[in-house]
Image (cartoon, coloured by chain):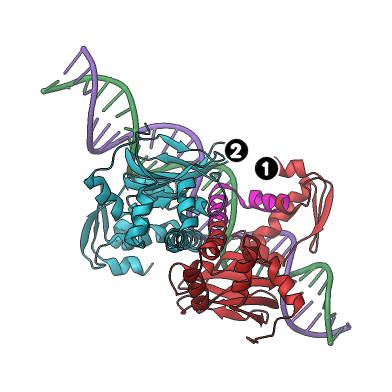
Chain colours: A red, B cyan, C purple, D green
DNA sequence: CGTAGAGTTGAACTTTGTCAATCAGTGTGG
DNA sequence: CCACACTGATTGACAAAGTTCAACTCTACG
């Protein structure tokens, strides 16, 4: 399914939206684009496995990608859920060339892949602004990963779900209605929960003015959520 | 307690041992050293708090530093335990200048601090090898953080403790005897456990040939540990 | 309609955190 | 040299939180 496509203007525009290029100067973004290949992935398609040699890293244009680890019994735990604009694997530009996790497309997904060797060459050849832009993306990922560790260790399922909902409220005022960005089972994984636990959390939150109808969320009292 | 010291040869040697400089070219390491200040911290001394503006990042020379978050009730969760050779806060070179966690010395600790502004200036001024070396350190931290997330979500307390012991076995053969690198309560935090849970894990492991006497660990059958 | 996939609910069970009491090791001062 | 206090570690009892498994519902879509 790894189809190389010529880049049209719409794709370029989408690519520019990517978090990676946001912090980049225009010349850097242009150099990066020269290493880019557009790719699509079918639902549940594996992108790579833990232990595989890595030849490129990725940005998500549309859809979602699940990064996860497996234990010896085959049980899986999500490490990160990447949505539109997210980059994953950029840490390999600077350290290592083996994947330390599995990745699969959650839905039909559109990705940009960047050739690691070419990116490293560019990073080594310029004044350092290119490398710094990628390093900024990796640093942001590190902050997110630490938020995740702290969140897991400090908060209960209910609190993590409430926190997620607060984050998703555009504007931060209530009452408010919006749609979940992804399937609930995917969200559960992102929050480090079994799907059942997410369900129960939503059920409990009903008493605090959170009404869930399919993917539609209605929040009547955001302050009550923050109080958790 | 932040005493600036002139750098003697022993200090230079210790500094060179640091993971940060390991991946660095000698000129880069020399440039980095120009931004460095030696600092000591008393046991339980706070280095900074979440939300503080960051002016430097750190490497640990001796002792341990606890990075943690607090929730609204004041309960704490460790994000990372830094020992000799570990660097923390380097992500701020590339993104952000506010601490997103608290830090305190676990024991009496000796640290090197690096002025963020100066480091950024050097990173912007050279051919990029300096920035790439720091980025490599941040990337390694990201891998560790993900190991931590996956380990927390996938393994029980017993499995995490067993995994830690296996990691600590020099050579990887049994029988073997070694000392824990730090206090048990600190280790518990590193593994995301309450001290009581670590105690119980050790008690359970007694039946699998792990004998704990204070900080001394005796492992008779490392294969039994791996089987968990 | 009917089927497949996603989501929900219930019940039993496991794991781990919390609280309280106790123990062990270490150092201090009388 | 011993009593005392202090800190860290251990143990038991208990409660809370989540997982797991199974049955059931709902919805979308052919």
State the separation of the CA atoms marked 2 and 1.
9 Å
Disc 2 and disc 1 on one polypeptide chain = no
* CB under 8 Å between discs 2 and 1: no
**Coordinates of residue A225 in the picture (x, y in percent):** 72, 44
Q: In this view of the protein, which residue sits in the foreground, B20 or D6?
A: B20
Question: Which secondary structure, mark 1?
Answer: loop
Q: Is residue C14 left or right of residue A61?
A: left
Q: How dense is the environment of label 2, judged by Cα within 10 Å: few (below 14), some, or many (20 and up)? A: few
Instruction: Indicate whether residue B174 is drawn in magenta.
Output: no
Q: In this view of the protein, which residue sits in the foreground, D4 or B129?
A: B129
Q: What's drawn in magenta, residue-wise?
A: A142-166
Q: From the image, give the main secondary structure of the stretch colored magenta.
A: helix
Image quadrant in which you'd find residue A6: bottom right
Q: How dense is the environment of label 1, judged by Cα within 10 Å: few (below 14), some, or many (20 and up)? A: few
Q: Can residue A165 be spotted in the picture?
A: yes
Q: Is residue B100 left or right of residue B223?
A: right
| Residue at figure coordinates x 43%, y 53% from the top left | B191
Q: Quadrant of the C terminus of chain B?
A: bottom left
Q: Can residue B215 be spotted in the picture?
A: no
Residue B78 shows which numbered tag? none
Residue A228 shows which numbered tag? 1
The answer to whether A11 is drawn above or below residue A156 in the figure is below
The answer to whether B38 is drawn above or below residue A104 in the figure is above
| Parent chain of label 1 | A
Residue of label 2: B72
Question: Which secondary structure, mark 2?
Answer: loop
Image depth: mark 2 or mark 1 in front: 2
**Coordinates of residue A177 in the picture (x, y in percent):** 83, 54
Q: In this view of the protein, which residue sits in the foreground, A7 or B199?
A: A7
**Coordinates of residue B192 in the picture (x, y in percent):** 46, 51
């Amino acid at each position: 399914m790894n189809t190389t496509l010529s880049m049209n203007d719409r794709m370029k525009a989408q690519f520019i939206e990517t978090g990676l290029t946001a912090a980049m100067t225009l010349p850097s973004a242009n150099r990066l684009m020269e290493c880019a290949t557009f790719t699509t992935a079918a639902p549940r398609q594996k992108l790579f496995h833990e232990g595989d040699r890595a030849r490129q890293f990725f940005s998500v244009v549309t859809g979602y990608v699940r990064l996860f680890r497996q234990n010896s019994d085959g049980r899986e735990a999500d490490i990160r859920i990447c949505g539109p604009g997210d980059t994953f694997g950029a840490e390999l530009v600077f350290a290592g060339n083996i994947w330390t996790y599995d990745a699969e497309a959650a839905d039909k997904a559109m990705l940009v892949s960047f050739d690691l060797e070419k990116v490293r060459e560019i990073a080594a050849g310029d004044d350092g602004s290119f490398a710094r832009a990628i390093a900024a993306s990796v640093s942001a990922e590190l902050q997110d990963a630490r938020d995740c560790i702290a969140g897991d260790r400090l908060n209960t399922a209910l609190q993590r779900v409430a926190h997620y909902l607060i984050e998703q409220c555009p504007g931060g005022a209530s009452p408010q209605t919006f749609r979940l960005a992804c399937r609930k089972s995917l969200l559960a994984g992102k929050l480090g929960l079994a799907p059942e636990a997410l369900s129960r959390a939503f059920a409990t939150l009903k008493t605090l003015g959170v009404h869930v109808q399919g993917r539609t969320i209605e929040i009547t009292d955001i302050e009550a959520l923050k109080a958790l």
